Image (cartoon, rainbow, N blue to C red):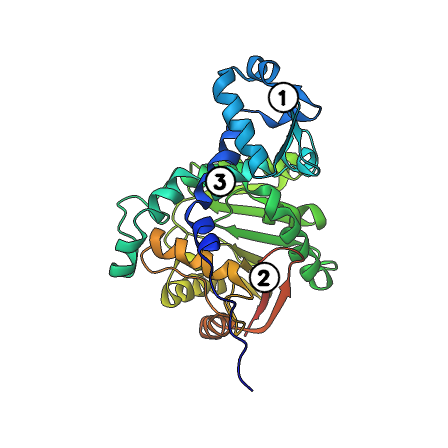
Amino acid sequence: MEATRLPALSRESLFDMMRAYKTTSLLRAGVELGVFPHLVEPTGVESVAAATGTDPRGLRILLNALAAIKVVEARDRRYRLAPGADELLVPSSGAYVGDMIHVFASDWEWDALKRLPEAVRKGGTVLEEQAETPGYSYWEDFAAYAPVVARPTAGVLADALAAWADDRPALDLLDMACGHGVYGCTVAQRFPQAGIWALDWENVLPFAQEQARRLGVADRMNVIAGDMFEVPLGGPYDLVLITNVLHHFSEERATELLQRARSVLKPDGRLGLVGFTTNDTSPKDDPAPHLFSVLMLAWTSAGEVHSEATYERMLTSAGFDDVRTHGVPSLPFRVVTATPS
């Protein structure tokens, strides 16, 4: 049976791709200037300009452009948020995601992607300062703004561990490359017998500690500052978490990290992983991991999103079995659990 071909690429759709960065810049400007909270009700330019400290002419041009991409409605020289935008772009809303623009459209990522042709030629990053650089400042922004997309995945992780964790009298948890701390803190919040050892660079750990305070588990958090490949890990632990980090490394380097995790796990412990994976699905049907791999190419020495088969191979080589994969509704992440062999 002949595979169905893609529809012909039109000039219009190609031009849309070429100018997609302009749409991103409009959203970023709206968030950074604090424009959206002033557009819950129909409002004139002068009022919004006064509230945000912006030039009325500049703001008018921005608002008209936001109207052009259907984020804002423009009528009778007054502007208001489009339906749904009041939930997603107003910080007081429980569904607010506007701050993710600082992650998805950060200068650090853009600086890396501007040099993508060079990275393709080399087979890895050409940047002097990049995702693997100790104490990289980008991780502070990631830790500050990414919790909103981590929380649903953290819930899936806690659910996946529940049958094993519920009856354990203690649950010592090592959260490697903890970042914002959402994963470890969510597990600790779900299981009151859990204690957390949060590991990351010294400049990132305060964000995990703040997350622990928000979730009411600060009294159960300990911190380990340093390089997760080199710093003493302590232990042994009932649970080791490695979340959204294995794609930064080659299969060999990622396997080395998994072996470190295995070395500090109790015989009846568990490993919890979170990250993108690829599979046999066509890239057009599962685009997110392949697009993310491009960032890893531009931003790391040998990273990429690994396939499900590669995860199986790495985990087996590192001394794990009973590998189980869990999907996350409406998000492109996978949760993986495994047990020591």
Residue 281, relative to residue 10: is it above or below?
Answer: below
Q: Considering the numbered disc 1 on the image, is that residue within a helix, a strand or a loop?
A: loop
- Circle 3 is placed at which residue position? 24
Please identify, in this view, whether the residue under mark 2 or under mark 1 is nearer the observer.
1
Please identify, in this view, whether the residue under mark 3 or under mark 2 is nearer the observer.
3
Q: Mark 2 packing: few (<14 Cα in 10 Å), some, or many (20+)?
A: many
Q: Residue furthest bottom?
A: 1
| Distance from Cα at disc 3 to Cα at disc 2 | 26 Å
- Circle 2 is placed at which residue position? 334
Q: Considering the numbered disc 3 on the image, is that residue within a helix, a strand or a loop?
A: helix
User: Is residue 245 something that shows in the picture?
Assistant: no
The image quadrant that residue 324 belongs to is bottom right
Residue 55 in percent (x, y) is at 48, 16
Assess whether mark 2 and mark 3 are in contact (beta carbons under 8 angstroms).
no
The quarter in which the N terminus is drawn is: bottom right
Assess whether mark 1 and mark 2 are in contact (beta carbons under 8 angstroms).
no
The image quadrant that residue 211 belongs to is top right
Residue 53, relative to residue 11: is it above or below?
Answer: above
User: Is residue 271 something that shows in the picture?
Assistant: yes
Q: Mark 1 packing: few (<14 Cα in 10 Å), some, or many (20+)?
A: few
Residue at the image position 45 percent from the left and 39 percent from the top: 22
| Distance from Cα at disc 2 to Cα at disc 1 | 46 Å
Q: In this orientation, which residue lies closer to the viewer: 55 or 299?
A: 55
Residue at the image position 67 percent from the left and 35 percent from the top: 82
- Circle 1 is placed at which residue position? 77
Residue 254 in percent (x, y) is at 41, 63
Q: Considering the numbered disc 2 on the image, is that residue within a helix, a strand or a loop?
A: strand
Q: Tell me the kind of residue under disc 3.
A: Thr
Please give left or right for residue 136 compared with residue 85 in the image. left
Residue 168 in percent (x, y) is at 70, 59
| Distance from Cα at disc 1 to Cα at disc 3 | 24 Å
Q: Tell me the kind of residue under disc 2.
A: Arg
